[in-house]
Image: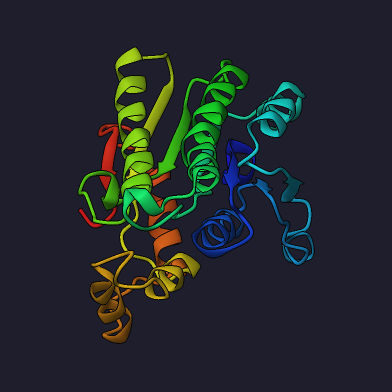
């Protein structure tokens, strides 16, 4: 059976950056993708006819996401699919700076997008794909979830939450369900541009990321997307609930 009938994927944050690269890699393999983002990519349906569906959902709004998850969209998408895939990629750097400078509304939005959304999606996906003998969830994490950075308290905490969620889900041993909270490395995306535009007062480690860009040491979204999809489709996926693409 070819990939087109064997797999089906849901990708969040599919229209930009790493999410767009992951989506393109899946589609190039013939794997249908349901893209879930606040904004859609108008070019995808023409480039990959019959392989892509998109839905506009503000993943930072838990009520909006809950309403969408109560619809039959997920269940319909994974029906009759042998290996359903969920890639929770959407995320935000969140408020950057020492604790007294962090805006409460920005904190709430970051936690909703970085934590509530992937956890809600994981639960709904697991229920919708219960008939499949092999279903896989990858949550795009970060090295910041495993190492603390000054000014990144919210980002570090939310990525650490994804790591611990994956560890706990793995301990549940739900039949056929594999999960991994995967750090992709430092990728040349809009988030990196946001980091470099942050003042040293708010993010003391800024110069390290400026140097990575200057020295050409950032991974490209395309290369990272291909490596992440290869990892997701590998027979050993889920052996480690928390992993790093860099090894």
Quarter-of-image position of residue 48: bottom right
Vertical order, 144 against 206 (above or below) = above
Q: Quadrant of the N terminus?
A: top right
> Does the image show residue 235?
no
Coloration of the structure image = rainbow
> Does the image show residue 237?
yes
Quick check: 136 left or right of 5? left
Vertical order, 151 against 87 (above or below) = below
Q: Residue furthest front?
A: 100
Point out residue 176 in the picture as x, y percentages from the top left corner.
Answer: 43, 20
Point out residue 14 in the picture as x, y percentages from the top left corner.
Answer: 61, 54
Front residue of this view, candidates 27 and 139: 139
Point out residue 106 in the picture as x, y percentages from the top left corner.
Answer: 52, 48
Circle count? 0
Vertical order, 75 against 43 (above or below) = above
Front residue of this view, candidates 168 and 132: 168
Q: Residue at x 53, y 64 (%)?
A: 17
Point out residue 67 in the picture as x, y percentages from the top left corner.
Answer: 74, 26
Vertical order, 225 against 161 (above or below) = below
Q: Residue at x 56, y 30 (%)?
A: 121
Q: Residue at x 51, y 35 (%)?
A: 118
């Amino acid at each position: 059976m070819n990939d087109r009938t064997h797999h089906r994927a849901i990708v969040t944050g599919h229209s930009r950056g790493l999410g767009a690269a992951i989506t393109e890699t899946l589609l190039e393999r013939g794997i249908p993708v349901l893209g879930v983002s606040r904004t859609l990519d108008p070019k995808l349906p023409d480039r990959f006819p019959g392989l892509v569906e998109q839905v506009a959902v503000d993943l930072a709004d838990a009520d909006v996401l809950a309403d969408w998850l109560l619809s039959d969209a997920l269940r319909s998408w994974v029906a009759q699919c042998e290996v359903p895939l969920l890639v929770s990629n959407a995320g935000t750097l969140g408020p950057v700076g020492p604790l007294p400078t962090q805006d409460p509304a920005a904190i709430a939005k970051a936690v909703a997008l970085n934590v509530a959304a992937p956890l809600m999606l994981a639960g709904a996906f697991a229920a919708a794909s219960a008939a499949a003998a092999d279903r896989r969830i990858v949550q795009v994490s970060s090295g910041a979830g495993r190492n603390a950075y000054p000014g990144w308290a919210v980002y570090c905490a939310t990525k650490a939450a994804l790591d611990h969620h994956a560890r706990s889900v793995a301990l549940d041993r739900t039949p056929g369900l594999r999960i991994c909270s995967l750090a992709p490395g430092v990728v040349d995306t809009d988030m990196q541009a946001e980091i470099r535009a942050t003042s040293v007062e708010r993010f003391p480690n800024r110069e390290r990321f400026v140097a990575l860009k200057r020295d050409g040491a950032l991974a490209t979204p395309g290369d990272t997307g291909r490596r992440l999809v290869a990892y997701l489709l590998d027979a050993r996926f889920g052996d480690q609930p928390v992993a790093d693409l860099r090894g």
